[in-house]
Image (cartoon, rainbow, N blue to C red):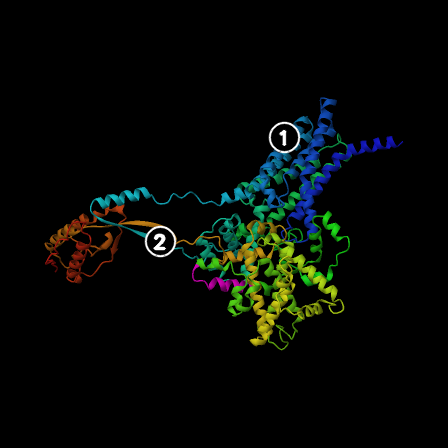
């Protein structure tokens, strides 16, 4: 009996496994499309894990389903010459499975590592395409369902091609190469030196002059005005402009210095809200380049291919609805309905996501008003819950409190064994105790104010590179505290973060809140609320510890996690010994500060233990000394702490590798990435080369004009000028530049002489001699030119004589006649 049931169950599973797998593939595609468009502002680890599992299983399920259908093909082909209706409809499913292998448009790659494997994906997908075509050809018959497979195959091949193309372009090698400028051979050096040598052999004095084209700062980056119909149209245009300018940052290439100047000009004169809005749109474009197919749709070919694939799926769905399906089993027809309906809905949903994206709004912003109105009105009616607008990142930061963690976490007896067996046990434990909070506007304003001040305070762009290395010492130096506190920022960077985090937490819990930074109830409506340095310091402090514990790869190399666990161990031991006193976080902080720190902890503990708990207590006592010795108010102390934390945050942002910044975009984004890009826009980056502009060299030839000028003066003396006589007088200045003075209505004889003189231009054109045309002068000033001609002649004769020849004597008299 058991054997019969087992055989029956095995038979049922064998018969239904294909149906189950194709439906599972559709379910996974639904998860990827819906969740993929939202992960750039999702921060939940559980949702991220769920999406990761769906991404990994999508290709596996589709590939396995194709293999099962292919296996059915061999069985069915051996039974009869004409394929059965059951096999024909399963062959039709294989076309839909190939469409699933093309991947959703909203998530092409789960991580950057996937883009590096684009060639392997190309080979695998090519193999799956061959299998699908084999199934299609093997099932070919007069059945109308075979004809419906053709449009699906067309749509599937478009999807496959787009997936491979996007992954290839996003790979580090191809992305870097796409940013290379066109080859520039520069000026013809050989030709230049030939001319130089030739003129020198002819006896001329030859020199070179370097002409510098200094970069011009453009105050208006977009010449075309933004369309008023589209919300934030100008911001979109600005963000797209800077997106193209600063893409080299994400490929470890050098930035164009002209773009740096333009960016500085823009960001130094904008408000905090505008600046961070531009940056989040810019990072949204970067996210789409590396993780989605968005960039493939915004070209004429991309739009055509997208509409073609969408039309193919919709037309097949309509054709299947109206076709006669009596020859096929009811269950197979129902499953096909589910597959086609799901595929059609997903295609339409993807199309709606594209319509509501920043790329579409950017395209409409560049169009004329009537075109933008025509397209934007229907888009504005799309429900926001389907495609959330204006959510480009999480706009939140992680918070981690060391003392709070020590109070909350009490490891059990089996914790040590779990660590040995589960490699990510610590990550699970640490992840359980951190929290997230929205970034207050006040925090962004303080960060922007300090970075903007530093950028404006540098007279030379090369000085901005030094700002990247400031990690707190400048803030201490500005308050003349570097002599007593600089030891805390000169340690290893992860050690400095831990020391200042604990010190900030101790100060926060022990300072008596006497209305610090709170607005008074009788303040007027127009009163500016003071900056709450205390709360800002606490936010950055806990955020930087969160980066140290949960995102250590975003910081410079170090042993931060070892220091963290040693410090936690010492703190837990301290709290366990003083349970009666340290009953909460505030009393624990007071107990820590009561410990004497006259002897350095490193002298007592040595260097084996990496704990910095009492080093932080030393720092707090030094800060308290400033209050008493310098009569500082608490507000002044917290301003100093805040300035140090902003520098620590800026240093961490500048030291983080670019690929780690890009990785965080798929996890909801990090404030550290936004600060990094803001610093680059303000010129505070090391990824540029200071140059003097585009250099060009001009060959300067100094001529011997004695014979030319003598011929001119003798000819001119014989001319009689009437009231309407006009003078055309070439004046030869130094360095081979020829200026021409003109008057109205010259006589023919004078014009003929002038043309002879101007013919010199042809003979020296290759030497880059410049010619200047000076405006007409009154006839009455002709006599006043006598001494000027004489002086110019003398100077030129003296300076332009060939080497080895003495200058000729100047004429004793120049005759000029005029009416």
Q: Residue furthest right?
A: 1
Where does the magenta region start and end?
Answer: 446-460
Q: Is residue 630 magenta?
A: no
Nearer the N terminus, badge 1 or badge 2? Answer: 1
Q: Quadrant of residue 603?
A: bottom right
Residue at 70% over, 29% down: 70
- Tag 1's secondary structure? helix
- Mark identifier at residue 212: 2
Q: Quadrant of the C terminus?
A: bottom left
Q: Is residue 358 visible?
A: no
The majority secondary structure of the magenta stretch comes to: helix
**Depicted 100 relative to depicted 743: above or below:** above
Relative image position of residue 687 (x, y in whole percent): 48, 52
Q: Quadrant of residue 599?
A: bottom right
- Tag 2's secondary structure? strand
Q: Nearer the viewer, residue 300 or 740?
A: 740
Q: Nearer the viewer, residue 638 or 349?
A: 638
Relative image position of residue 302 (x, y in whole percent): 55, 42
Q: Of discs 1 and 2, which sits in the foreground?
A: 2
Q: Quadrant of the N terminus?
A: top right
Q: Is residue 468 visible?
A: yes
- Judging by the rendered image, the residue that carries numbered circle 1 is 130
Q: Quadrant of residue 433?
A: bottom right
Q: Residues within 10 Å of mark 2 (few under 14, many from 20)?
A: few
Q: Nearer the viewer, residue 237 or 519?
A: 519
- Mark identifier at residue 289: none
């Amino acid at each position: 009996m058991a054997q019969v049931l087992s055989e029956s169950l095995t038979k049922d599973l064998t018969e239904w496994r294909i149906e189950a797998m194709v439906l599972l593939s559709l379910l996974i595609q639904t998860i990827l499309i819906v969740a993929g468009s939202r992960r750039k502002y999702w921060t939940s680890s559980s949702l991220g894990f769920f999406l990761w599992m769906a991404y990994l299983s999508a290709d596996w399920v589709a590939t396995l389903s194709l293999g099962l259908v292919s296996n059915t093909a061999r069985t069915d082909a051996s039974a009869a010459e004409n394929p059965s209706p059951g096999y024909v409809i399963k062959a039709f499913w294989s076309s839909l499975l190939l469409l699933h292998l093309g991947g959703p448009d909203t998530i092409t790659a789960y991580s950057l590592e996937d883009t590096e494997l684009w060639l392997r994906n190309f080979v695998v997908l090519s193999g799956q395409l061959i299998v699908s075509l084999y199934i299609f050809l093997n099932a070919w018959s007069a059945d109308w369902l075979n004809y419906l497979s053709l449009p699906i195959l067309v749509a599937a091949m478009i999807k496959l091609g787009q997936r491979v193309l996007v992954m290839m372009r996003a790979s580090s090698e191809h992305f870097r190469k796409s940013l290379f400028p066109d080859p520039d051979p520069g000026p013809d050096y050989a030709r230049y030196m030939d001319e130089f040598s030739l003129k020198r052999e002819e006896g001329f004095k030859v020199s070179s002059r370097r002409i510098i084209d200094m970069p011009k700062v453009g105050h208006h980056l977009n010449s075309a005005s933004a369309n008023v119909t589209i919300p934030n149209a100008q911001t979109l245009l600005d963000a797209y402009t800077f997106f193209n300018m600063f893409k080299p940052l994400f490929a470890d290439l050098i930035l164009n210095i002209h773009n740096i100047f333009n960016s500085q000009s823009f960001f130094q004169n904008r408000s905090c809200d505008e600046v961070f809005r531009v940056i989040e749109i810019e990072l949204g474009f970067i996210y789409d380049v590396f993780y989605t197919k968005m960039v493939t749709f915004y070209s004429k070919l991309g739009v055509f291919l997208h509409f073609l694939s969408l039309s193919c799926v919709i037309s097949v769905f309509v054709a299947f609805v109206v076709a006669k399906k009596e020859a096929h089993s009811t269950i197979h027809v129902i499953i096909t309905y589910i597959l086609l309906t799901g595929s059609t809905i997903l295609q339409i949903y993807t199309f709606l996501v594209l319509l509501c994206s920043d790329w579409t709004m950017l395209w409409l912003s560049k169009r004329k008003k009537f075109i933008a109105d025509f397209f934007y009105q229907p888009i504005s009616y799309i429900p926001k819950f389907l495609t959330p607008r204006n959510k480009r990142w999480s706009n939140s930061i992680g918070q981690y409190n060391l003392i709070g963690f020590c109070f909350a976490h009490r490891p059990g007896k089996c914790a040590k064994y779990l660590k040995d067996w589960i490699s990510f046990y610590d990550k699970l434990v640490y992840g359980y105790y951190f929290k997230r909070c929205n970034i207050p506007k006040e925090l962004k304003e303080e960060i922007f104010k300090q970075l903007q001040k530093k950028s404006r305070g540098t007279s030379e762009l090369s000085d901005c590179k030094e700002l990247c290395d400031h990690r707190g010492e400048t803030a201490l130096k500005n308050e003349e505290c570097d002599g007593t506190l600089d030891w805390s920022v000169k340690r290893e960077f992860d050690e400095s973060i831990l020391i200042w985090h604990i010190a900030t937490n101790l100060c926060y819990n022990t300072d008596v809140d006497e209305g610090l930074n709170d607005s008074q109830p009788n303040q007027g409506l127009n009163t500016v609320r003071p900056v709450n340095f205390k709360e800002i310091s606490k936010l950055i402090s806990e955020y930087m510890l969160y980066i140290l514990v949960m995102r250590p790869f975003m910081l410079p190399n170090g042993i931060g996690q070892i220091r963290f666990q040693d410090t936690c161990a010492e703190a837990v031991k301290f709290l366990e010994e003083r349970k009666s006193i340290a009953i909460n976080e505030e009393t624990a902080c007071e107990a820590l500060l009561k410990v004497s720190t006259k002897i350095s902890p490193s002298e007592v503990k040595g260097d084996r233990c990496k704990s910095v708990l009492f080093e932080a207590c030393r720092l707090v006592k030094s800060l308290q000394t400033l209050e008493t010795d310098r009569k500082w108010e608490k507000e002044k102390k917290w301003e100093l702490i805040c300035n140090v934390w902003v520098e620590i945050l800026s240093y961490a942002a500048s030291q983080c590798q670019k690929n780690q910044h890009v990785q965080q975009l798929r996890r909801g984004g990090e404030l550290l990435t936004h600060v990094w890009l803001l610093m680059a826009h303000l010129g505070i980056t090391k990824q540029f080369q200071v140059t003097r502009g585009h250099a060009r060299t001009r060959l300067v030839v100094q001529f011997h004009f004695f014979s030319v000028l003598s011929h001119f003066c003798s000819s001119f003396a014989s001319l009689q000028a009437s009231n309407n006589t006009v003078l055309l007088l070439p004046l030869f200045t130094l360095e081979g530049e020829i200026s021409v003075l003109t008057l109205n209505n010259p006589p023919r004889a004078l014009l003929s002489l002038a043309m002879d003189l101007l013919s010199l231009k042809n003979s020296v054109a290759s030497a880059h001699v410049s010619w200047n045309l000076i405006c007409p002068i009154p006839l009455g000033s002709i006599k006043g030119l006598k001494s000027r001609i004489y002086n110019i002649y003398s100077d030129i004769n003296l300076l332009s004589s060939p080497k080895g020849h003495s200058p000729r004597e100047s004429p004793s008299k120049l005759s000029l006649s005029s009416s």
